[in-house]
Structures are given as C-alpha cells and as structure tokens.
Image (spheres, rainbow, N blue to C red):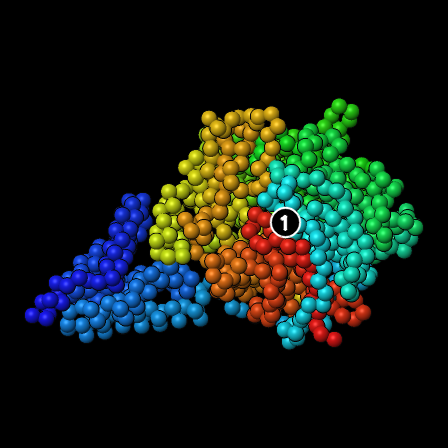
C-alpha cells in the first residue's frame, strides 16, 4: 500500500523543476537539432533530444532506469565531444556543462525519490560522472592548441647597440625605425622579473568626452631620449615626462575638436629628430648618397611586381652606394638653438605639429608656426575623414607622413597619398599617390590628389643604409566592394610598398592580397633584420605581418620572397558586379588556420548557444580564407580584425628570434543591396558612424555592408577558444617553436573568473636582451612577462584600465624600466582610463 501511494503522490517542487528542465532541454535539442541536421550539421542534438525525452518520461514514472539512460547520455556525449574536439578543456566545457551539472542534481536530489531498486541507476550515473571528471581533468593539462618547445639558446652580441643608439634609449616607435621593438637591456631577467613593482604612475587627464566616437583608444608607445619620455594621449595631447620619476616637464595641446563621426580618436606615438651639428642616430640618419638617389630614379620607372629586375638592381645599387657608417653620419645641414631637437606630433584632424623637444614650444620655422596642414590638395577636407594616427618616419632630410582614410563611408573620400616634407621647413618635397596614374605627380593649382587612394595607416619602417621606407598598405575604400576599382587603384593596394625616402620614387611593391574585398590590409609596422639562413648566408629582410596570419618575409632590397609564398587557389563567386582573384599568396611562415572551420569548431557558454552558433555557421557562406562577401552573409576567417593587427612583432636581432601575438576571431560581413533606407548617395551633411563595425554605408557603390564579430546570442565568440596566443619563432629556421594561450575572461565575464582561455588582443609585444618578452594587449587588464625561450609566463601585474598598447623599455642611471599605457579601447570594450605606468626592480 505505501509503495502504491508513493507512486501516485505528487512529484513535489524538486520533481517538477527537474521534469520541466529536462523536458524543455529535450524539446530545444530536438527542434534545434532537426534544423541543424537539415543544414548538414551534426545529428548529436537530435539523438540526445530523443533520449532525454525518454529520460523525462521515466523520471515522471519514477523509474530508476532514467538514471541508467541518463548515464548513457553522459558517456555518449563524452565520446562525441572527444571525437569532435580532442582533450581541449574549453571545447569540452560547453558540451558537458549543463549535462554534468544536471547529472549531479539527479544524483543528489532526485535519485532517492525514485522507486527501488535504485542501485544500478545510481552506480551508472556515478560512473558516468567520474568518466567526465577524468576527461576534464586530463584536458586541463593536455591542451592540444599549445605548442611546447624551446628556442635554442645562444649568446647575443647586442648588435642593436652598435646602430648608433644609446642602449638606454627608446627613440622611435619601435625603438629603432627598423621596427624591432627590442631593448638591448639585460637587467631584467627570467629569474628576477617576478620582483617587478610599480616605479611611477602618470595620469594624462585625457578621457572620453561627449563628442567622441566609440572608437577612442589609448594605443601609444612612448619614446625616450636622454632624461625625457614623450607620449601622446587619445586627443593628441603631448606630454614630456622625467624618465626616472614620471614627473611632468611640459605639455602641448593641439586643441583637437572631435565629432562622433570620427572613425578614430587615437595616437600611437610621436617621432623625434636631432638636427644639431653632432646628431648621429638611425632615427635621424642621413639620406643615402647621391649614387643611391640616382639609383632611386632608375627604380622609379620599374614596373610594379613582387620584385622587378629594375627595382632589384636599383635597390642593390643604393645598398652599395651607402656604406654602413653613413647611416650614423652627421646631417649635411644643421640646426642649432631652439628646435634643433624636435618632436613631431600627428593629429587626427589632418595636421602635423613640430615642437621643441626640450620646451614644447612650436618650431616657428616649420610650416605655419610649427603647424603643417596635411589637408592641402585633398579632394575632401572634412575633419576626421583623413587621420594620421601613427608616428611618421624621419630621416636627416625628410619626414614621411601617411594616414588613415575613413573605412567604408563612400567612394568620394580623401586620398591615401604618402608625402615627404622637408624635415626643417615642412616644405613638400615629394608625393606618392597610390591611386594616381603617375603616383609622383604633385597637384598644381586647381588640382587635388586622387579620391580614395589606398592608404597606409599603420607605422612604417626605414632602412637608413638603403634609404628605403617600407609602408604597409591598405585597400581603397569602400573596402568590401571592388567592382568599380581601376587598375591604378589595385596597383599598390594591400601589400608592402618600398619607396626611396629622399625622392619618393618606387623601389618595389609586393601585394599580399589581390583585389582585396575583406580589408585584409597590411596592418602593422614592418620589421627589418639581417637574418642568417640555413646555408649560412646573411640576408637583409623585411617581415610583413598580414591580417591573414601570413608573415611575409622579403628581401628588403628587391622585394623577392625569402620564405616561399606560393599563389594558391581561393574561393570564387563574387557578388553581382564584382570579381575575385583566382589565387592569393600564402606564406610558408604563417599562423593561419591549417584546416577550414566546421561546426565542430563552434562554441558557446552552454550546449544551447553552441547549438545556435552551429545553425548560424551553416547559414553563412564559408569556403575558407578569402570567401567572397555575399548577400547571404559571409564568415570571414581570419576576421576583419586580422590575425595580426597594429602591434606587429618583436624581434631580437641578436638571437634572430621573434615574438608574435596572433589572434583568431571570425567576423561576419553581409552586403546590403540599395533600396529603402539604404540610398546610393548620402544625404546632405551625412557623416561617418564613428566605428569600424556595424552598418557601414559604402555610399556610391551598389551595396552597404554590416561588419561584426561572429558572436553567439550571449555575446560570446561562436568560434571556440583560444582567440589569442603568444608565440616564439626561430627566424633562422622559420619555425614556430612555442605557442601558448594568453589572457583570461576576468574582465569579460559577468563573474570575474581568471580562466585562461586565450583572449583577443590589440597591441603588440616587446622583447629585451635579458630574455624576457612583455605584452599587455589582451581583453583583460594585465601586463605580462614571458620567457622568450619557451613561452613560460613569468610575471603579471594588474592594470587599472585596458592595456591596448605596446610596452617599451629603457634605462636611466643604471635602472631598467618597462612602461605601458593603460587607457583602454572603446570599441574593443576594455575599461577606459588615462594611466601610464612604469615598472622596475626594487633598489
């Protein structure tokens, strides 16, 4: 009688909750899984949904068989999960989380309510949970995405210190204009870096204002000369600090007037030149000899190619014409007194200021009282549409300026012209307009530079011996449509452009993305180094990190590939009216995905949003890298953010090793045909959106576009982690020796959990001769130190705001400092601030 009453009694509150949860879950999996299966996805969700429906019925009947059946679900899910993702903890977690937690619920709160005999069911469920515990524990210590290795040790000669730069200084954005981000300092080592502590903190007071766009960022890498540190804040306020104490010496405010339509409000850095009689440093090196200048004229007429014979012979002549010692020779014409040492400050409204490095006063003899108007002869002069955001290259004679052009607003935007100005007077010496039939033509009265020429927004690099400047090139905007581009517009787009710095004549050009429809520009400063190859030859190379994850390695004299980059077939089928290139170059030195993404790679916080991400994935067009944009919606991976961004790589020139921080975050682009609410031409007074994501109008072409990260309904990336890595490369063998996840979800999740998943990054690494690499960049607020030999994390410090900036290092009075700007990034979503923080070992 009692058993009969127990069977017919109400299931109670816990029983109702249990039945409701598992019933809803089974229905969700059945309906969503059936839809996924119809799209060609996994059958797991349908099968699991059916079995869970049976578990629901058995629980309703209080049958202990429900526990046995649920245990089979857990075991089957473990087998399926390992088959799909291997022992990757963060791939297994969403597949197991809900089911394992509910299994514990059944064991602790429900099993004793079932009819006897319950022993077999309880044992089955316990066994299944133990299996999952073992799988997850094993996965914690066996990450299949990690590459473990050690770079062969060697003793460097500190050759970087022989370049005419004081080892204690950091006088250019990348320390040298070769862009190495390498400090030849050895006080901080893997053994003592754990003892670093804050030496000083400076606050700029420059914060986001009511008229600023979403894309306000603090990306500055300070420079240091002598006893002074120079840095700029997002609104291009310039600060000179005492390098030892961080005390303010002087400040200059260009009074930038922003608008929410600005696509960027940022300043990556400033440039320095010493024009005094005894100046001698690569950052202020003399131009090449007359023979090299003559060689540049010969190269100017060379046809554009990855490496033309004419350009190669001209560049070789330039190399032989300028002996190494000339790079550090005094400049021919000198400046003394005020402004003999100068800081050049680019400002987002299209101006460049020259300031006395000691006082901050304007250099009266430069342009208009120290203010050079970069809007001159531009076809559009609307503030914010042309923005110099990166520090210019400075030689002993020329200051070379390029800038960003607003992405995806219209086909009637400013030119991406590159210009060389007299370093003393600001007089225009030459121009290279990448979209013009004659790139070196300087517009006369009534003329202007070419609309929408491809632009170079990231920092450039300079070889003083060759007198060649290397510029990372973007694509003509609008970026995601190319049906109306002329051959001239394609000629110097999305690649690495080498110009003779003194004349602006072409040396060579290497294109890394043909007919670019994905904004796969060259996003970071090239890095120059002399590398010893396997056969013992020393080759002067330039490293070009690309958004595609390819690291192009070229002979910097000729543009010829040093590491092979074969042309491989890519997906075809552009939107109506456009076209695609049948092939694209893929470097053998690369971080790009080895395999196409599949629905196995889709992710979520739970099995629910993972299922939704799988459905979303199958509804998008995706056939691999360079899948053309579409009305259907295209999965872009590597994404528009790129695997490399403006942070670039850091390179130890003594040991010939590099540190890189690639990211892996897919985007989705969807073309929007013209129609109601999407006019072909802008209304009067229309302005930009103030961001590079979301709806982009692309006025003047047949389509607008939406650009967004590929996210789940919960706002998490739909691709499983890791989304960011730090890696070590042996440049003598071109081998990626180690690669580790970097960054936690502490500042991204509702609960501040320190789970190391591998986070997206903006910013780059810095490397020291002491064998330590430093990096901020991640979407959590930390600066970290790593052993360059094996990638072991040695130290981390909590930052008061996002560290989306590249750190630098210098020494003063025998003490080594590491400095990073912690000001956050608006569109990246990290905490905004105004901090500059220096770390050092205790006295």
Asked if 690 appears above or below 461 in the picture, the reply is above
> Left or right: 345 with respect to 605?
right
Q: Label 1: how many residues lie within 10 Å, few (<14), some (14-19) or many (20+)?
A: many
Image quadrant where residue 472 sits: top right
Look at 72% across and 65% down and name the residue there: 200
Look at 60% across and 25% down and name the residue there: 684
Image quadrant where residue 477 sits: top right
Asked if 371 appears above or below 779 in the picture, the reply is above
Look at 69% across and 50% down and name the residue there: 206
Count of picture labels: 1
Q: Tell me the quadrant of the picture where the N terminus can be found.
A: bottom left
Outermost residue, left direction? 1
**Residue 260 visible (yes or no):** yes
Q: Position of residue 81 (x, y in %)?
A: 34, 61
> Left or right: 764 with respect to 579?
right
**Residue 505 visible (yes or no):** no
> Left or right: 52 with respect to 719?
left
> Left or right: 762 with respect to 623?
right
Q: Nearer the viewer, residue 423 or 356?
A: 356
Q: Provide the residue designation for mark 1.
A: 217
Asked if 457 appears above or below 281 in the picture, the reply is above
Look at 49% across and 44% down and name the residue there: 708
Q: Nearer the viewer, residue 477 or 291?
A: 477
Q: Tell me the quadrant of the picture where the C terminus can be found.
A: bottom right
Asked if 311 appears above or below 133 in the picture, the reply is above
Q: Nearer the viewer, residue 275 or 780?
A: 780
Q: Position of residue 449 (x, y in %)?
A: 70, 30
Q: Position of residue 57 (x, y in %)?
A: 18, 58
Q: Position of residue 599 (x, y in %)?
A: 37, 51
Q: Secondary structure at mark 1?
A: loop
């Amino acid at each position: 009688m009692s058993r009969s009453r127990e069977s017919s009694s109400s299931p109670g509150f816990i029983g109702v909750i249990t039945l409701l949860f598992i019933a809803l879950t089974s229905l969700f999996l059945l309906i969503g899984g059936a839809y996924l299966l119809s799209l060609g996805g996994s059958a797991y969700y349908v099968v699991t949904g059916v079995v869970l429906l049976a578990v629901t019925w058995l629980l309703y009947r209080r049958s202990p068989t429900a526990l046995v059946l649920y245990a089979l679900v857990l075991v089957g899910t473990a087998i399926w999960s390992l088959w799909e993702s291997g022992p990757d903890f963060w791939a297994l977690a969403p597949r197991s989380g809900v089911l394992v937690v509910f299994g514990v619920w059944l064991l602790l709160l429900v099993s004793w309510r079932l009819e006897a005999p319950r022993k077999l069911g309880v044992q089955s469920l316990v066994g299944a949970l133990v299996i999952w515990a073992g799988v997850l524990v094993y996965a914690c210590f066996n990450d299949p995405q990690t590459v473990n290795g050690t770079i062969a040790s060697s003793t460097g000669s500190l050759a970087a210190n022989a370049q005419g730069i004081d080892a204690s200084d950091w006088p250019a954005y990348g320390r040298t204009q070769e862009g190495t981000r390498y400090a030849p300092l050895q006080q901080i080592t893997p053994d003592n870096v754990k003892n670093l502590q804050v030496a000083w903190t400076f606050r700029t007071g420059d914060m986001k204002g009511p008229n600023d766009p979403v894309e306000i960022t603090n990306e500055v890498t300070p420079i240091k000369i002598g006893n002074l540190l120079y840095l700029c804040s997002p609104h291009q306020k310039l600060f000179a600090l005492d390098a030892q104490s961080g005390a303010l010496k002087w400040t200059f405010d260009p009074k930038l007037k922003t608008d929410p339509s600005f696509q960027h409000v940022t300043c990556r850095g400033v440039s320095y030149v010493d024009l005094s009689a005894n100046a001698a440093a690569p950052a202020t090196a003399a131009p090449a000899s007359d023979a090299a200048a003559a060689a540049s004229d010969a190269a100017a007429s060379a046809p554009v190619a990855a490496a033309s014979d004419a350009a190669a012979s001209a560049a070789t002549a330039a190399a032989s014409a300028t002996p190494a010692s000339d790079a550090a020779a005094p400049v021919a014409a000198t400046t003394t007194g005020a402004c003999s040492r100068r800081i050049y400050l680019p400002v987002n409204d299209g101006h460049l200021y020259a300031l006395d490095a000691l006082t901050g006063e304007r250099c009266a003899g430069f342009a208009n009282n120290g203010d050079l108007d970069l809007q001159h002869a531009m076809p559009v002069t609307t503030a914010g549409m042309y923005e110099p955001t990166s520090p210019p290259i400075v030689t002993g004679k020329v200051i070379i300026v390029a800038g960003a052009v607003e992405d995806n607003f219209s086909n009637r935007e400013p030119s991406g012209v590159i210009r060389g100005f007299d370093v003393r007077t600001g007089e225009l010496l030459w121009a290279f307009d990448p979209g013009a039939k004659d790139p070196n033509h300087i517009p006369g009265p009534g003329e202007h530079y070419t609309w929408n020429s491809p632009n170079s927004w990231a920092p450039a690099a300079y070889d003083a011996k060759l007198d060649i400047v290397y510029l990372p090139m973007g694509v003509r905007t609008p970026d995601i449509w190319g049906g109306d581009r002329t051959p001239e517009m394609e000629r110097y787009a999305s690649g690495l452009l080498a110009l003779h710095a003194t004349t602006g004549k072409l040396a060579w050009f290497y294109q890394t993305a043909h007919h670019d429809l994905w904004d796969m520009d060259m996003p970071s400063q090239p890095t120059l180094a002399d590398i010893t190859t396997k056969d013992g030859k020393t080759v002067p190379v330039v490293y070009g990190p690309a958004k595609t994850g390819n690291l192009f390695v070229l002979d910097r004299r000729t543009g010829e590939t040093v590491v092979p980059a074969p042309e491989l077939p890519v997906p075809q089928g552009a939107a109506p009216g456009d076209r695609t290139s049948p092939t694209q170059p893929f470097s053998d030195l690369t971080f790009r995905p080895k395999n196409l993404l599949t629905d196995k790679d889709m992710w979520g916080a739970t099995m629910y949003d993972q299922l939704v991400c799988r459905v979303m994935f199958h509804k998008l067009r995706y056939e691999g890298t360079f899948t053309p944009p579409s009305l259907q919606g295209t999965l872009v991976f590597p994404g528009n953010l790129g695997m490399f961004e403006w942070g670039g790589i850091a390179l130890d020139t003594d040991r010939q090793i590099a540190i890189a921080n690639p990211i892996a975050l897919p985007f989705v682009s969807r073309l929007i045909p013209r129609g109601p609410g999407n006019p072909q031409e802008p209304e009067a007074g229309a302005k930009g959106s103030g961001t590079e994501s979301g709806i982009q109008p692309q006025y003047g072409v047949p389509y607008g576009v939406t650009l967004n990260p590929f996210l789940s309904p919960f706002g998490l990336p739909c691709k499983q982690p890791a989304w960011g890595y730090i890696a070590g490369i042996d440049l003598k063998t071109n081998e990626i020796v180690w690669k580790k996840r970097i960054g936690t979800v502490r500042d991204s999740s509702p609960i501040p959990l320190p789970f190391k998943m591998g986070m997206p990054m903006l910013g780059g690494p810095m490397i020291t001769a002491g064998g330590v690499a430093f990096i901020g960049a991640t979407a959590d607020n930390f600066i970290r130190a790593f052993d360059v030999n094996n990638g072991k994390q040695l130290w981390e410090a909590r930052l008061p705001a996002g560290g989306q900036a590249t750190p630098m290092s210098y020494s003063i009075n025998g003490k080594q400092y590491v400095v990073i700007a912690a000001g956050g990034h608006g569109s990246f979503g990290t905490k905004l601030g105004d901090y500059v923080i220096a770390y050092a070992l205790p006295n």
